[in-house]
Amino acid sequence: MERNQEFTRKQVASHCQKQDCWMSINNIVYDLTDFLKIHPGGSIINSYMGRDATDAFNGSHMVGLNLLASIQKYKVGRLERQVPTATPRDCFDYPAYLDDFRKLRQQVRKDGFYRPSQTYFATAYSVTILCRVLAVAMLYYPILPWGPLNFFVAACFAGFSGGQQGFIGHDANHNALLPSSKGNKIVGFFFFNILNGVNSRWWRRRHSRHHVNCNLIGEDKDIKTLPILAWDEKMVTDHLKKGGISFFLKHQVLLFTTLGAGSLNILYNILAVRFVFQRKSLLAALG
């Protein structure tokens, strides 16, 4: 096949199966059928079979890594240039706003906003650990005259620390804190696995899908919360087709504000444990 041949979006979309998978990245069309099995990020790549993966690719990989060089051998041609339209009729039209967003992203990167701030990380890390230490200290060495007030203040310190630990772990697992992927994984492991009891490897696999298919029902696993919580009428309709409706969904309006966050936390912990047992791997358990 001529490697400079041009293909339309509709032609690329016709190759949308595991045994015949094409994708376009930065207007280059690749046949990634053989690459699916060895993709370092796992099956998340399957979400873009037959689609333009430019924005998902650029948003999911660290700045400065020349990863496209490793898949040049899979190149089959170029994506046909289309005239941008302000009112796209279907997924094969090229929306005009897409170029605007891509230009904005390039400008933001050029201005240095994607570069990790070591000062921010050091400050956030220090404050978070300090609050955790203060919370524990106030339980054993009360300094306020009224006993219950010590517990309340300690709980505030612990709650703030726990929230910040989640944010730091989130940024680290997004490769947004340190220059190296390995360093970010270590920080993410410490703040997620050690301090918060969350499996960082399970979280990365799940949350990465959220960013490449944000709020897309059936693809975004972060909103796959049935039978505890539904985010859209379609989720309820699909759930009813499977027979019955759960107690939580029947009373979601009343329970969401009181039990919503807690029940989701329990669900996520169950899913994380299942993830470990499904893979039967100590590496999966460690994150």
Image (spheres, rainbow, N blue to C red):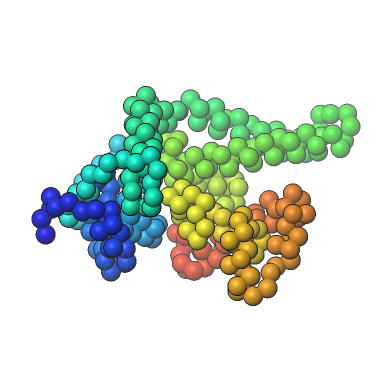
Q: Residue furthest right?
A: 146
Return the x and y of residue 231 as percentages of the image width and height.
61, 55
Is residue 196 rendered to the left or right of residue 5?
right
- Total marks drawn? 0
In the rendered view, would you say 31 is above or below 190?
below
Quadrant position of the N terminus in the picture: bottom left
The picture quadrant where one finds residue 98 is top left
Instruction: Name the residue at 54% across, 54% down.
Output: 222
Q: Is residue 152 visible?
A: yes
Instruction: Name the residue at 57% across, 52% down.
Output: 198
Between residue 71 and residue 154, name the one nearer to us.
Answer: 71
Instruction: Name the residue at 52% across, 68% down.
Output: 277
Between residue 208 and residue 189, name the one nearer to us.
Answer: 208
Q: Residue furthest bottom?
A: 243
Q: Is residue 58 visible?
A: no
Return the x and y of residue 5 as percentages of the image width and height.
14, 52
Is residue 134 rendered to the left or right of residue 3?
right
Between residue 18 and residue 216, name the one nearer to us.
Answer: 216
Between residue 215 and residue 259, name the one nearer to us.
Answer: 215
Instruction: Name the residue at 50% across, 31% down.
Output: 121
In the rendered view, would you say 210 is above or below 154?
below
Return the x and y of residue 163 as percentages of the image width and height.
63, 40
Is residue 251 rendered to the left or right of residue 268?
right
The picture quadrant where one finds residue 254 is bottom right
Q: Residue furthest left?
A: 2
Return the x and y of residue 180 as percentages of the image width and height.
37, 39
